[in-house]
Image (tube, coloured by chain):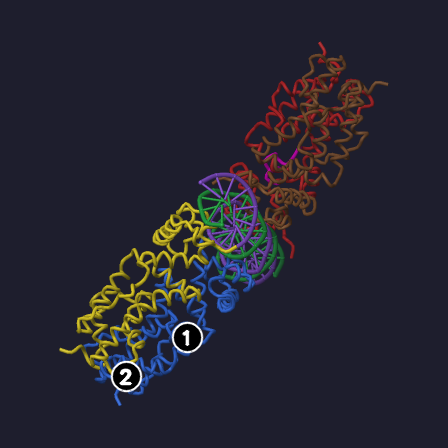
Chain colours: A red, B brown, C yellow, D blue, E purple, F green
Amino acid sequence: MTANPARRSETSRQAILTAAFDLVGEVGYAKLSIEGIAARAGVGKQTIYRWWPSKGAVLFDAFLALMGGGPGDDAALPDTGDLAADLKTVLSATVDELNDPRFDEPMRALNTEIVHDAELAAAYAERLDLPMRELKRKRLRAAKEAGQLAADLDLDLAIDLLWGPLLNRWMQRGGPLTHEYVNALVDTALNGMRQGAPG
Amino acid sequence: MTANPARRSETSRQAILTAAFDLVGEVGYAKLSIEGIAARAGVGKQTIYRWWPSKGAVLFDAFLALMGGGPGDDAALPDTGDLAADLKTVLSATVDELNDPRFDEPMRALNTEIVHDAELAAAYAERLDLPMRELKRKRLRAAKEAGQLAADLDLDLAIDLLWGPLLNRWMQRGGPLTHEYVNALVDTALNGMRQGAPG
Amino acid sequence: MTANPARRSETSRQAILTAAFDLVGEVGYAKLSIEGIAARAGVGKQTIYRWWPSKGAVLFDAFLALMGGGPGDDAALPDTGDLAADLKTVLSATVDELNDPRFDEPMRALNTEIVHDAELAAAYAERLDLPMRELKRKRLRAAKEAGQLAADLDLDLAIDLLWGPLLNRWMQRGGPLTHEYVNALVDTALNGMRQGAPG
Amino acid sequence: MTANPARRSETSRQAILTAAFDLVGEVGYAKLSIEGIAARAGVGKQTIYRWWPSKGAVLFDAFLALMGGGPGDDAALPDTGDLAADLKTVLSATVDELNDPRFDEPMRALNTEIVHDAELAAAYAERLDLPMRELKRKRLRAAKEAGQLAADLDLDLAIDLLWGPLLNRWMQRGGPLTHEYVNALVDTALNGMRQGAPG
DNA sequence: ATTTAATCGAGACGGTACGTCGTGTCTTACA
DNA sequence: TGTAAGACACGACGTACCGTCTCGATTAAAT
């Protein structure tokens, strides 16, 4: 009665994910349709409905496939000992990704879908956000242990303080996302608004 | 040929905005339809299409109307001299609003619509975000002039640093939004992650 | 409360009738609309609704105006003494009219409207059909009195027998309407299907 | 891409035709709508649009279905040897049908639709009118060969002469359709207006 | 190697909503 | 008061997709 994954056509799966990712870039998320994906992928609609519960889930998988399936077990944020520099490196990479038009629209789409779909949000949290957050936490914990961060600093708050402004500016289109912005952000977050970047 | 605003029915306008706001709260944004709004408002669909370009635009106006048309000219953030306390007050109020189920769904809806509709984003920026941002800038500028903030601090970055984490956590459902969170956020942003909140 | 014909704008009336007649020829009856007539005539919709009860009524008046208001009191069918020749003359003229593309579409439109609108049908009967029928009856009565028709012939049946085949062929597009057809029709109707046209 | 007749749902087809026929009788042709037919038939609108090009085409098929798909190959007009009697029989049956309110409105509707839709007119001619006309021609040809009709009589004109007056009177509501009318019509058409019906 | 059952492409189906057009009524401003 | 203009509530249009369903035709496993 239930779908048997063993029988699943890998060809169709790939075609669907590719079609979904391409289409969302071409026509935008609002005009993305299951019918459109099926037609583009040369696939019956049922094949999509059989394996994914919603349009957002397809998009999410397309995204995951592109990302290489999320961070591997051995992935880690750079740790040169210079926390500020490392954070600037990581955030700059994020900024570059967000500025890449190839990723911008699909990422926005996924984000907005998550807002309305609790199940999808859970999958997103578990498979993409949580692993990344753990990596961030790990790097900050190391810095804290090295005495580079306040001993009573809440690490989740710290992550919010670094990534929140960036992601919020991106989502709201609140201004350009540049490396300069990232640098100032990291310096100010580390040293506080009360005093400028040191030296 | 084009609609003449002078002849516009205020009754219908109000009914539409009310219906839109109520419905988005009841059925959610995904199931919100122009047809539904028109039916609920006792209005012809054409009357909506005549005056608003999109579903999001209606929702935006509904939002504006609820907000009392945006901040008045004489509006200002509190200034007791204690910057930290004032920020905590303001951000706590924001948190309360974001936690109010009456506002949560419509706000999310508006935000996701903005992500995909550039024109709507511009209207949002101009009529809601920009005025608020100016108020924030004003308060921070006063603090800077009082020597409570670094002289070279970029005010827009500062605003991002304070509101960004909050809004991002809300949008991504990254965790509970509490007054404690706000307090820690303000203290850490002001003093930096390198040192804890001052005794 | 009711419209006062004295105040009626003759300019608008003419513009409306002209617009209606022109439009029905251009876009066909199915796509003819009150809005279209009003726009073409440079007239408010209300002006049409004030003076005509229906789209068909406008068309009917447009038709009447074109026809010069129906047959005058002194109008008569030709009477040269040769009944067959006279009928052929009259029916040939009718055929020419029906073949004129300028009249064809409006006439069809009026006819189909009459089928569904009893009030319009009455107006048509009274103002166009009945007067014409009386003229036909008059000519045939003269022929009967001259001994050219059977003494017990029902004149209305006779009219049907002459005009019915013609109009039915036109309405049903049952074949070309030619003068030859008319000639054969008149001869056969007069002499009967049992014997051919005399010598 | 195009509809595949093999997969067509016979149930839906029947429901649509029945609904169309019933509705045209209940609300009249002017108020007949695709939406109404779909609702009555418990069918999606698309299912109608998929298989029929227009409202008139649906009505036409409904009509055809009711008629049993047109005359069969072995159908024929009665031939007792008495031409006048046979014609009176057939035309009387036609008159009865035209007077049946169950058929009157749909027939009028179909006729008016034919007037404006050339494609539909062709379908009508080919599938309903032409087969019937051939039957009529056959009966008249037999009469001609039996010497009961003029040798040079054009059979199509003859058919017009017999059915034209009847159908025209019906369409124009030119008077009551009775068996007496039919009898007089047949006699006069056969013998001509110049002489009465033979003793 | 053959069976056999799930998956596949295709696409019809009952629905919902879309955005547009036209209806007939109403209101406003002008002549 | 009649008029041009046009907003209004309403109903239908014809289209796009939804998610479900059936239909042969692969196709890959278990015989």
Q: Residue furthest front?
A: C6
SS at mark 2 in the image: loop
Residue B160 part of the magenta-drawn span: no
Subunit under mark 1: D
Q: Residue at x 72, y 17 (%)?
A: A81
**What is the quadrant of residue A118 in the picture?**
top right
Report the magenta residues as a range: A61-71
Q: Quadrant of residue A163?
A: top right
Residue placed most toward the observer, C62 or B60: C62
Q: Which residue type carries mark 1?
A: Leu
Q: Are marks 2 and 1 in contact (CB under 8 Å)?
A: no
Q: Quadrant of the C terminus of chain A?
A: top right
Q: Is residue C76 above or below residue E6?
A: below
Residue A173 point in image, percent of width and height:
61, 28
SS majority, magenta: helix
Relative side of A63 to A146, left or right = left
Residue D163 image offset from top left, x and y in percent = 32, 75
Mark seen at residue B160:
none
* In front: label 2 or label 1: 2
Choose between C64 and B35: the one closer to the eye.
C64
Q: Which residue is mark 1?
A: D98
Residue B153 or residue E11, whichever sits in front: B153
